[in-house]
Image (tube, rainbow, N blue to C red):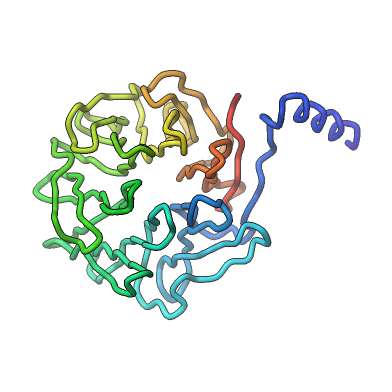
Amino acid sequence: MRSRMVIFAAIVTALGGAVRADERLTTDGRIKNSPVFADRSGAELIYVLQERPVQFRLMRMKLADRSVAPIHPQQTKTEFEPALSHDGNVLAFVQSRGNLSLALVIRDARAGKDAEVPPGAGFSGPRSPVFSPDGTRVLYSYPEQGRQRIYSVNLEGRDLKTIIDSDGVNNWPDFSPDGRRIVFASTRDDDYEIYSAAADGSDVHRLTHSPRQDIRPRYSPDGSRIAFMSGRDGNYEIYVMNADGSNVRRVTKNPESDDFPAWNPDGKRLVIVSERDGRHDLYLVGLPP
């Protein structure tokens, strides 16, 4: 066994570190989702943990020692789908308001105040928030009247702009690092595929073409690639492709599901939620060369 490890280490060194074994970040095995890095340093990670007495709680992990603590220790409502501004000063998240109604909370640590996008009529509310690179706007999806559109608001939850409006569901938006384009998943052509558009919603291009769903696209820190989850090979796995949809590469190959990709700020690795032996944990995984 020792000789095999030495050989593996030699291969890694020869390839300049391009090949890395998966690094397990959590070991509790509880259901998790939506990991995001707290800022560009890559020192802290925010994620969602299923935990009583609330259904889902926002957690903060320090990667140096793997210490974990709740962001809101006195939380009484379910909170999930976190997003942070690039400087880490503004946190957006979805909060349950009862009866399956959801609100988008925008918490500005500098101003010491909250803004929100309130729940809609019936069982609805904002989903999947993400900040613009300059930190002045929040994109989110919102279901209404048989569609799920993508909207934009400022940090006060005002100045509403419709960005993506088409038949079907449009969800999981993300900004390119330069703020010029967005990616999102849409069912406009029946199944979930990934699309790119200008930041104002114009110039829409379809990037993926698979018989099964492609969702949760995320731009790499340099904007050259997009990570996403796909069921194209019969199992939920993580893939990367060029920003124009070319050169699709499979990242994970596990018998259970891999989901929720988040780019490490170094652009060389992803944090994902991986189900292995029925346990759900965060892993740091390398990318194919």
Q: Is residue 150 left or right of residue 235?
A: left
Spot occupied by residue 246 in the image (x, y as percentages of width and height): 41, 19
Q: Residue furthest left?
A: 145
Residue 31 percent location from the top left of the image: 50, 57
Q: How many marks?
A: 0
Q: Residue furthest bottom?
A: 74
Q: Residue at x 46, y 19 (%)?
A: 247
Q: Residue 147 versus residue 114: which sits nearer the camera?
A: 114
Quick check: 163 left or right of 128? left
**Side of 184 where 19 appears, left or right:** right
On screen, 153 above or below 185? below
Task: Return the residue found at the far top.
Answer: 246
Q: Residue at x 47, y 77 (%)?
A: 73
**The N terminus appears in which quarter of the rendering?**
top right
Return the residue nearer the eye: 60 or 90.
Answer: 90
Q: Residue at x 38, y 61 (%)?
A: 80
Look at the picture and state if 110 lies above or below 200. below
Image quadrant of residue 213? top left
Task: Answer above or below: position of 137 versus 250.
Answer: below
Q: Quadrant of the C terminus?
A: top right
Q: Who's the residue at 31% across and 39% down the image?
A: 179
Horizontal and vertical percent position of residue 202: 17, 31
